[in-house]
Amino acid sequence: MPSSTENPSLSSEQRPAADALGGSDAAATVLQGAPAFSPLYQQIKTLILRSLQAGEWKPGDMIPSELDLAARYRVSQGTVRKAIDELATDNLLVRRQGKGTFVATHAEQHIQYRFLRLLPDAGDPGSQGPAERHIIECRRQRAPAEVARQLGLRSGDTVVQVRRVLGFQGTPTILEEIWLPGHSFKGLTLETLSTDKGPMYALFETQFGVRMVRAVEKVKAVAADADSAPLLGVQPGHPLLSVERLAFTYNDVPMELRRGLYRTETRHYHNELS
Amino acid sequence: MPSSTENPSLSSEQRPAADALGGSDAAATVLQGAPAFSPLYQQIKTLILRSLQAGEWKPGDMIPSELDLAARYRVSQGTVRKAIDELATDNLLVRRQGKGTFVATHAEQHIQYRFLRLLPDAGDPGSQGPAERHIIECRRQRAPAEVARQLGLRSGDTVVQVRRVLGFQGTPTILEEIWLPGHSFKGLTLETLSTDKGPMYALFETQFGVRMVRAVEKVKAVAADADSAPLLGVQPGHPLLSVERLAFTYNDVPMELRRGLYRTETRHYHNELS
DNA sequence: CAGTGGTCTAGACCACACT
DNA sequence: GTGTGGTCTAGACCACTGC
């Protein structure tokens, strides 16, 4: 135990929360001007987040126990607990009683597609086996202006473009166009994608160290055009769901833009509101 | 109020009620079969929920302070706190520091439509003022089989059917068909609906004591049919978003079925995934 | 000022998973 | 049994709101 002067009323100033136990300490940060009050557990949350970004703990790994972290950050278990709680509700960590707390991953999640909201109208979702996948193409090119804008790239930067079709029980159902920053996805090839089984986001984690954390989608109704229609086996003009997804890594950095066309004759986009 | 509000029954197995928790219990009850362990804060949550359902505290009301509730249920403040925390993340309660904890309401929420996910493609959501509303009809009838099924009614029970159009800046955009259990919405008329300003869900709260708590939606792409097209000012065949919403009150009781057709030329259905 | 929710601590004990 | 997360308590103090 360090200096017995660990007095309980540390809340008035920002606690440095010495990262390693090495004890850089006592350097109470002075809150000048604007910086609003930030509770300790928020600071802990940020520190944990930083370790996640830095790859100190990788997807699927178990992170140190609450007591270990409490010792490391020099706070009580309850404070660490609250930080982890929030990270868990954000789906960045997964708690498992009796075992430990783990870094969330897109692999090993018994739900095949974590972000895909398309469900069959009837029957349970798991009943129709995995989707059939056909990669149409995978090439590197210069980012179109709109793509660059959404991915936070400079217009002209290299992106990887992937096109593929997903089918269920022999019926082509989803046509997707995916753009990824070339810089972060060096070496992604059609070969890689075609060979791989399992969710694409799992591949991104294992092969490129990129973990998608959250996403926003814009959904519209559109008519199938001459290009898309044959790939989905419908007539031009057929109504399709257009789903544009922007997915983010840690720190709200956009890392993927995905434009999908969904057939919804026997499936629907499912959403829960509260 | 009279002191009749005594401690409603907590599961006796783990809580000897008032006495010191020294070691007096150990009443390791052998409940075999189903009844799994239920933490105290969950029981508290259920009790609070019950009070909400019973209307002891109405939407907009302030509920008793944490310390009051802790005394009432004979538990610590922390336990009440955790119960309230969960109810707050479920959007059933709203905490306001320094003021109190309040029952959530659809009125007074600066967001006009709590469940409506349709946003303009560009510009901020609040910029285009309120929607223009036209009630087409409001009548009582026997529930079609499918409607009855989803609302948990017997086929043949009375339902209120409402049809209306919402427009933005002069453009009809949403055509909705709404079914409500007749039993819970006695006295709902076209007159009432037309006169009222503000969200329909707010009206439901104030006039009928029905608070919608959560909802699930099924979204599809469809083609405008001959009936809908003129009401939305589009050609038959025009692609529209079909949004079927089932909304629930407390206790997951279904209370509204709503089928909407959305024009999405300049708007999109927005969704956040995590 | 008093009252409310919000943070933090320290310690006890319970439930669960592995070995 | 040991180690993990999960629950519960009691008490202290902080931050915000309104009288």
Image (cartoon, coloured by chain):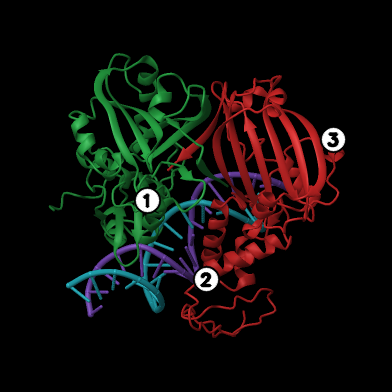
Chain colours: A red, B green, C purple, D cyan
The residue that mark 3 highlights is A195
**Crowd around label 2: few <14 · some 14–19 · many ≥20 (10 Å):** many
The residue that mark 1 highlights is B111
User: Which circle's residue, 2 or 3, is located before the other in the chain?
Assistant: 2
Q: Nearer the viewer, residue A138 or A77?
A: A138
Task: Tell me, yes or no, if residue A245 can be seen here.
Answer: yes
| Chain letter for the residue marked with disc 2 in the picture | A
Q: Nearer the viewer, residue C5 or A226?
A: A226
Q: Judging from the image, what secondary structure is the residue with disc 2 in?
A: helix
Calculate the distance from the C-alpha at mark 3 to the C-alpha at mark 1: 47 Å
Q: Are marks 1 and 2 in contact (CB under 8 Å)?
A: no
**Crowd around label 3: few <14 · some 14–19 · many ≥20 (10 Å):** few
Task: Tell me, yes or no, if residue B259 can be seen here.
Answer: no
Q: Nearer the viewer, residue A223 or B118?
A: A223
Q: Judging from the image, what secondary structure is the residue with disc 1 in?
A: loop
The residue that mark 2 highlights is A40
Q: Nearer the viewer, residue B161 or A5?
A: B161
Q: Is residue A19 above or below residue B62?
A: below
Q: Locate residue D15 relative to residue A128 in the image: left or right.
A: left
- Residue displayed at 38% across by 45% down: B114
What is the x, y in percent for residue A2? 62, 82
What is the x, y in percent for residue B29? 42, 41
| Chain letter for the residue marked with disc 1 in the picture | B
The residue under label 3 is which amino acid type? Thr
The residue under label 1 is which amino acid type? Ile
- Residue displayed at 50% across by 81% down: A13
In this view, the mark in front (1 or 2): 1
| Chain letter for the residue marked with disc 3 in the picture | A
